């Protein structure tokens, strides 16, 4: 494996609907793809080896309850950053997270990343924003705003009904009406 700029990315769930496009996006960079079936992707492995890795992408279905152990090994090996594929309902009660039926462990994986001691989500985003020309003061204020809003319910307005002259449809209704496109 060739390392570009000293960065090596470990990508879990590398053959999935998120992992495969992520690999394409990282084309030209050193990656270590991890998948349950390495025969589906040249160079992929089934067990994550964090030796020499600088950043880890965690897919909750791919790593499941093994995320905390993987991140302990990653930190000990010198990994600096972790990115988690999160879900909008990560803070909902576990029995209200439909993707758990498919094996996703969003809540546990996100908690493992936060508790890992590695740079994660906001810290990485903030550094990326500064690197791309945003003033550090702006980025700090923006991240502080996100932190203040964390855990607060979203504002719900009656604007849809006011504009359309009818109540808003639920997501379930929309999916039912567009089922042929959702499949």
Image: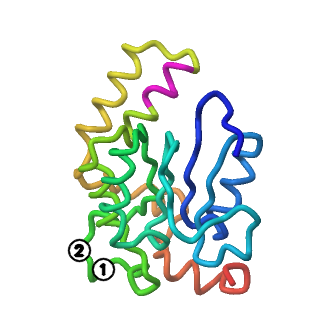
> Magenta part of the protein: which range?
126-131
Q: Where, quadrant-wise, is the C terminus in this rendering?
A: bottom right
Q: Residue 121 at what x, y percent from top left?
A: 40, 43
Q: Which residue is mark 1?
A: 96
Residue 111 lies in quadrant: bottom left
Closer to the camera in the image, 40 or 88: 40
Q: Residue at x 23, y 74 (%)?
A: 93
Secondary structure type for disc 1: helix
Q: Residue 37 at what x, y percent from top left?
A: 64, 78
Q: Name the mark on residue 159.
A: none
Q: Is residue 142 left or right of residue 50?
A: left
Q: Residue at x 67, y 73 (%)?
A: 38
Q: Residue at x 57, y 71 (%)?
A: 46
Q: Is residue 156 above or below residue 166?
A: above
Secondary structure type for disc 2: loop
Q: Is residue 6 left or right of residue 159?
A: right
Q: Name the mark on residue 93.
A: 2
Magenta span: chief secondary structure: helix
Task: Assess whether mark 2 and mark 1 are in contact (beta carbons under 8 angstroms).
Answer: yes
Q: Residue 25 at what x, y percent from top left?
A: 72, 47
């Amino acid at each position: 494996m060739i390392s570009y700029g000293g960065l090596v990315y470990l990508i879990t769930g590398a053959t999935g609907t998120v992992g495969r496009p992520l690999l394409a996006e990282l084309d030209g960079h050193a990656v270590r793809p991890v998948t349950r079936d390495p025969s589906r992707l040249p160079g992929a492995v089934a067990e994550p080896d964090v030796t020499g890795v600088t950043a880890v992408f965690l897919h909750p279905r791919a790593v499941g309850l093994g995320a905390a152990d993987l991140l302990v090994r990653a930190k000990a090996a010198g990994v600096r950053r972790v990115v988690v594929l999160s879900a909008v309902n990560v803070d909902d009660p576990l029995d209200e997270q439909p993707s758990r039926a498919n094996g996703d462990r969003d809540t546990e994986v996100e908690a493992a990343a936060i508790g890992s001691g590695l740079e994660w989500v906001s810290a990485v985003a903030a550094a990326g924003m500064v690197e791309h020309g945003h003033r550090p003061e702006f980025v700090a204020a923006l991240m502080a705003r996100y932190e203040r809003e964390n855990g607060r319910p979203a504002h719900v307005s009656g604007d849809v009904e006011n504009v359309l002259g009818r109540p808003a449809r639920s997501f379930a209704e929309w999916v039912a009406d567009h089922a042929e496109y959702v499949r």
